[in-house]
């Protein structure tokens, strides 16, 4: 289905929910790893396992309810009707694992601002270069919006930037590239919940390997396990399903640029839940990011409708 065939209000609503989930994920990861209540391997293992269990539970419940409703109306003609036909891919499962694992390990050796800049820079470059490679022509207004949004993002994280270690830089860069490919793979999803569920399930063999390799160094506390579980079940599992739904109405460029809002939403979350102060820098960068995203997301819709 073309992005232009998806109602814009629905796309904006789903995108907003997904980005809030991403920001919550960043906050939960920062709480867990920053307080050293869990190690990077343990956080990744519990996050992906919790995501898989939660999503499969939701998927099974939805399948049961759909089958019951069809039986009630005499519409279930065969067993096949109740089985989701869309089951993700091993490639998406691999990209999801690489993103989640390297994200956690990279943040052990760098601060939040530096990690965010490297991650979202890699995501943007990956998705935009792939869209250009596939022949998606960017409009001038999209280039302008993309530059404005990224400039606002850099201005936001600039005070927090430190010099990352080479290993940390490489891990976060590859994590961003993997997330970019995972996002691109989800643009054609016909059943976002099913695809996301099976993608999480496909990470479990690699999760098992990570557990075996790191079992001697695992550091687990009740608080750390709770943050990791919430990150996996809600912010990641449910959030990524919503993101796959939103992607049906976004171009690759739009999907890349709107993710720059995540650090902004995380900063607002810090104000709401951790009594942090809204600074002039946050307000200026927020205006730049929002303005740039508005040009990218709404510009193509407006010009297309006008043409």
Image (tube, grey):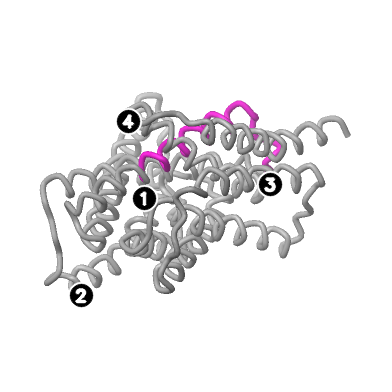
Which image quarter: residue 249? top right
Q: Residue at x 18, y 44 (%)?
A: 226
Label for residue 148? none
User: Which tag, 2 or 4, sits closer to the chain's start?
Assistant: 4
* Total marks placed: 4
Q: Are circles 2 and 4 on residues that touch, CB within 8 Å?
A: no
Q: At which x and y percent is residue 103? A: 38, 59
Residues in magenta, as a range? 2-25
Is residue 166 on the magenta stretch? no
Q: Residue drawn 70% across and 40% down?
A: 296
Q: Secondary structure at mark 4?
A: helix
Horizontal and vertical percent for residue 268?
A: 43, 31
Q: Earlier in the sequence, mark 2 or mark 3?
A: 3
Q: Which residue is mark 2?
A: 213
Going from N to C along the chain, the mark reached first, 1 or 2, is 1
Number of the label disc, if any, that sits on residue 197: 1
Circle 3 residue: 146
Q: Residues within 10 Å of mark 3 (few under 14, many from 20)?
A: many
Q: Earlier in the sequence, mark 4 or mark 1?
A: 4
* Mark closer to the observer (1, 2): 2
Q: Nearer the viewer, mark 4 or mark 1?
A: 1
């Amino acid at each position: 289905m073309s992005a232009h065939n998806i109602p814009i209000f629905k796309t904006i609503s789903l995108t907003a929910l997904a980005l809030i989930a991403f920001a919550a994920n960043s906050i939960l990861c920062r709480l867990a790893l920053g307080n050293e209540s869990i190690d990077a391997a343990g956080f990744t293992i519990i996050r992906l396992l919790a995501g898989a269990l939660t999503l499969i539970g939701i998927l099974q419940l939805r399948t049961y309810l759909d089958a019951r409703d069809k039986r009630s109306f005499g519409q279930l003609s065969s067993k096949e009707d109740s089985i989701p036909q869309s089951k993700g891919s091993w490639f998406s499962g691999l990209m999801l694992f690489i993103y989640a694992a390297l994200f956690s390990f990279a943040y052990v050796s760098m601060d939040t601002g530096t990690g965010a800049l490297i991650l979202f820079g890699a995501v943007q470059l990956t998705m935009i270069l792939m869209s250009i490679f596939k022949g998606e022509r960017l409009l001038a207004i999209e280039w302008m919006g993309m530059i404005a949004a990224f400039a606002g993002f850099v201005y936001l994280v600039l005070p927090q930037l430190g010099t990352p270690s080479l290993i940390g830089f490489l891990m976060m860069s590859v994590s961003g590239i993997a997330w970019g490919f995972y996002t691109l793979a989800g643009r054609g999803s016909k059943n976002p919940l099913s695809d996301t569920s099976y993608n999480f399930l496909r990470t479990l063999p690699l999760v098992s390997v990570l557990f075996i390799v790191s079992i001697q160094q695992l550091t687990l506390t009740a608080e750390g396990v709770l943050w990791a579980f919430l990150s996996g079940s809600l912010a990641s599992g449910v959030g990524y399903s919503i993101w796959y739904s939103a992607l049906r109405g976004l171009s690759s460029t739009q999907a890349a640029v709107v993710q720059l809002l995540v650090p902004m939403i995380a900063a607002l979350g810090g104000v709401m839940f951790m009594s942090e102060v809204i600074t002039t820098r946050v307000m200026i960068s927020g205006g730049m990011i929002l303005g740039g995203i508005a040009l990218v997301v709404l510009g193509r819709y407006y010009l297309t409708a006008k043409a």
